Amino acid sequence: MGDDWVVLGRVSGLFGLDGWVRIFSHTDPRAGIIRYNPVFLQQQGQWREVAIEAGRAHGEGVVLKFAGCHDRDQAMALMQAEIAVRRSQLPPPQPGEYYWADLEGLQVITLDGVVLGTVTSLFATGANDVMVVQGERQRLLPFVQGQVVVGIDLEHRQLRVDWDPDF
């Protein structure tokens, strides 16, 4: 997938008998994935455009009905498909806000110039988001701007952190 695509979630389960699916959404709030239409589904390494016919929050998750998906068998064929949108479909982030997709791949450097590695992924916890940084070993760093994360330079693909390399 090129820089023009952003993965927003994946099909994680079936919901009912009429083609609805459960979605694991990376958007905040989780039900925010519903507002992107059309989306692109990846199956067997191929991306295809599909419209969201309906969707809603359900408990702590999200359920969607894709156009052309009318029964449980068709929904089963979508299991584990990644859901993406074109970057142009996303609103620009506010100052000081970043899409996770923009942080992934950044080189992580301490204030003393020690390279810790590269951001390979991020995940949410109750308190704050956490960056997975892979270098000579894997580190989990809290994404707390102004405390741990002291600078983000998307142009030069670097993220500066106030972090002890021995930790």
Image (cartoon, rainbow, N blue to C red):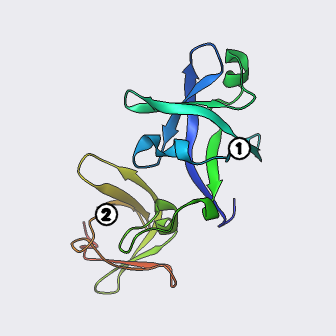
Give the crowd class for mark 1: few <14, some 14-19, many >=20 residues within 10 Å: some
Image vertical order of residue 99 relative to residue 23, above or below: below
Q: Is residue 46 visible?
A: no
Q: Secondary structure at mark 2?
A: loop
Q: Is residue 100 left or right of residue 141?
A: right
The residue positioned 46% from the left and 61% from the top of the image is: 100
The answer for how far apart the CA atoms under marks 2 and 1 are is 29 Å
Q: Which residue is mark 1?
A: 42
Q: Is residue 83 left or right of residue 109?
A: right
In the depicted view, which residue is nearer to us: 119 or 52?
Answer: 52
Identity of the amino acid at label 1?
Answer: Gln
The residue positioned 24% from the left and 66% from the top of the image is: 167
Residue at the extreme top of the image, as rendered: 17
Where the N terminus falls, by quadrant?
bottom right
In the depicted view, which residue is nearer to us: 11 or 67?
Answer: 67
The residue positioned 49% from the left and 42% from the top of the image is: 25
N-terminal-most mark, 2 or 1: 1
Q: Position of residue 126 (x, y in %)?
A: 26, 46
Query: What label sits on residue 143 in the rendered view?
Result: 2
Identity of the amino acid at label 2?
Answer: Phe
Q: Is residue 56 left or right of residue 52?
A: left
